[in-house]
Structures are given as C-alpha cells and as structure tokens.
C-alpha cells in the first residue's frame, strides 16, 4: 500500500510518500517539502499568531493535495516540538483539523526519541548490538540507547538548532562571547542526562540522524547524498572539534557555500555543531555513523507493525 507521512516540524513541513507492506522495507516514492519555519513564526510568548496559523493551514492543505495526487491510501500526520510547546497549540490543531480535515498528532519528545530509535534499529539490524542514537532537530535534541527495538533510556532536551540560534546567537557570524555562553548552556543541559546513559554500559554502535548531523558529516568529508543511502558516512569527534571554530567565524552565506549545507539551514549550523560537539564529548563518543532513516521512517514502521498484528 502507499503510505504518506506528514511531518510538521520546527523548520519544515515534509510529506514523505512510501510504498510499503508488513515485512518489507518501505520504498520512498515521493518527497514534498516546504520550508515553513514554523518556529520563526511564533510570537515572543511562544504562541503561533494568525499569520503563522494561516500559513500552516495552507501548507497542510497543499501537502494533502499532493498526497491525494500521488495515490496515498493512508496519511500519518504528526507535529513535533514547535506545536507541542505552543500555549495555543490545541487551538491551532483544531483549526488545521477544521479547515483541512487533517488531524495532526502531537508527539512527545520521548515518542520522537523512541520512534527514531526504532528506525535506526531496523536500518542497522540486531548485529549492531547496543545502540546509542542522537538526533538534533529544529526544536529539540533526542538521545536514546538500548539493546532492543524499544530503548532502555530516551530523553528529549530543548536543544534544537533553530531554537538555540534564535535565543542565543544574534550576530552573523555570532560573537565569540555568544558562542561561549551557548556552549556552557548546552553542556549543562546534556550533562544532567549523562548518568542515565552511562549506567547502560558502552554502546556498540553510535548513530546519528537528522539534517544537522548529515551536514556536519558532509562538511567533514562524508560522501554526498547523491551517492545513495548505502554508502557508509561517519562523523568523528576530532573532525567536529576542528570544524566548530571554523563554522563559528563564517557568515551564513559562507556556510551555505560548504558542501551539503542548504541555504535555509546555514544560519542554524553553528548552534547544531555546538550541540553535536557537546553530546559527543559528554557521552564519550569518538565516532558515529549517519543513518538515512529517522523519525518519519519510525512512524511508518510502527504503523506497519500495527497492520501486521491486525
């Protein structure tokens, strides 16, 4: 059957269409992405105003039309941290439902971590042993670890690249003091969770998903996405530590000229690199591998599992 996942994130609204059935690998059929930048449309108090809500409704309606054009049989719509934390999130969801018929399910941070972990486990399989999975989104950082398909520990921290850029980095390039203050904040937040993961023992395989990690790996020399999903892509702590100070003194335009960096994400890359560097250091990770599957695939796999049981 043809499934569609509609992902309303802090940066983009992404419709992924896949051909899937229980027991088979979901095959991507079509991708439709809109850079809505929902988090940037929020008022200072975190509410989504009239303009932002109208744009969200319009974007969801457009994605629904594309899904219908592509023959999607079952649409799985969800939203992450931007709407999860908006004080008027329920009102926004109700309006989206009323005007488009799409019922966006708001995932908790722990749900995000668990579903991403499931996708990574299925991609790499049981032979990868104990997994540690990191994901930096626009609004949050998810960390999960475990030996099975359900992680033994999963946390979500408000350390997304977009969120931190808006709150802490105001110059282009940001000032050295801004980066130092951000670094301290990020490390304090991550350090609080380290014991939860270290008690599980050393992971056999450390994996990262998300655009931020993919871009950092690409800058550090990993193969381009055009070479396909099965090429091994790694990011080392040493290369990240080398690149972070270089990224911090570049303008957004200079970062956008780097291999694999999109113009829309270039402004967030310094904050993302600060989070990645802190996570690898505090969790004592020397090298990680990039996984092409993440949250959207986790949602598809969970749905297929449910179908197989009914």
Image (cartoon, rainbow, N blue to C red):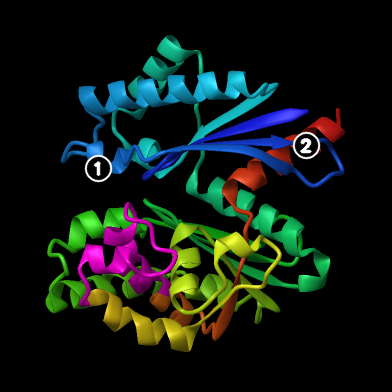
Which residue is at a point 46% across and 89% down the rendered structure image? Answer: 238
Label 1 – label 2 distance at C-alpha? 34 Å
Q: Residues within 10 Å of mark 2 (few under 14, many from 20)?
A: some
Q: Where does residue 168 sit, x and y in percent of width and height?
A: 19, 62
Q: Nearer the viewer, residue 78 or 62?
A: 62
User: Quadrant of residue 199 in the image?
Assistant: bottom right
Tell me: residue 139, above or below residue 231: above
Q: Which residue is mark 2?
A: 20
Q: Nearer the viewer, residue 34 or 7?
A: 34
Asked if the magenta segment contains residue 260, the reply would be yes
The answer to whether residue 284 of the structure is visible from this angle is yes
Region of the chain picked out in magenta, as a range: 249-276
Q: Where does residue 8 sit, x and y in percent of width and height?
A: 45, 36
What SS does tag 2 mark? loop
User: Quadrant of residue 203 in the image?
Assistant: bottom right
Q: Nearer the viewer, residue 123 or 156?
A: 123
- Say which of marks 1 and 2 sits in front: 2
Q: Residues within 10 Å of mark 1 (few under 14, many from 20)?
A: some
Which residue is at a point 18% across and 63% down the rendered structure image? Answer: 169
> Which mark is on residue 61?
none
Do the CB atoms of the residues marked 1 and 2 lie less than 8 Å apart?
no
Which residue is at a point 74% across and 67% down the rendered structure image? Answer: 147
The mark that comes first in sequence, 1 or 2, is 2
The answer to whether residue 103 of the structure is visible from this angle is no
What SS does tag 1 mark? helix
Image quarter of the C terminus: top right
Q: Where does residue 18 sit, x and y in percent of width and height?
A: 69, 37
Q: Which residue is mark 1?
A: 40
Q: Along the horizontal axis of the image, is 119 left or right of 274?
A: right
């Amino acid at each position: 059957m043809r499934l569609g996942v509609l992902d309303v994130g802090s940066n983009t609204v992404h419709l992924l269409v896949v051909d899937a059935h229980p027991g088979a690998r979901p095959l991507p059929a079509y991708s439709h992405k809109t850079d809505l930048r929902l988090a940037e449309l929020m008022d200072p108090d975190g509410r989504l105003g009239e303009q932002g809500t109208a744009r969200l409704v319009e974007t969801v309606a457009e994605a629904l039309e594309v899904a219908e054009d592509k023959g999607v049989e079952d649409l799985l719509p969800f939203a992450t941290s931007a709407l999860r934390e908006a004080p008027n999130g329920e009102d926004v969801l109700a309006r989206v439902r009323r005007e488009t018929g799409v019922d966006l399910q708001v995932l908790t941070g722990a749900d995000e971590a668990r579903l991403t972990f499931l996708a990574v486990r299925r991609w790499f399989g049981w032979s990868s042993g104990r997994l540690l999975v990191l994901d930096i989104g626009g609004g949050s950082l998810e960390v999960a670890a475990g030996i099975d398909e359900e992680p033994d520990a999963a946390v979500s921290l408000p350390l997304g690249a977009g969120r931190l850029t808006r709150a802490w980095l105001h110059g282009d390039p940001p000032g050295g003091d801004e980066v130092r203050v951000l670094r301290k904040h990020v490390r304090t937040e991550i350090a609080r969770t380290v014991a939860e993961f270290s008690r599980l023992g050393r992971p056999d395989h450390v994996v990262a998903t998300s655009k931020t990690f993919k871009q950092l790996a690409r800058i550090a020399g990993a193969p381009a996405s055009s070479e396909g999903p099965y090429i091994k892509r790694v990011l080392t702590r040493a290369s990240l530590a080398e690149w972070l100070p270089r990224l911090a003194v570049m303008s957004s335009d200079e970062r956008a000229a780097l291999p694999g960096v999109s113009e829309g994400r270039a402004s967030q890359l310094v904050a993302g690199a600060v989070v990645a560097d802190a996570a690898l250091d505090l969790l004592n990770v020397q090298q990680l591998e990039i996984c092409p599957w993440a949250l959207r695939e986790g949602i598809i796999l969970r749905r297929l599992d449910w179908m197989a049981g009914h």
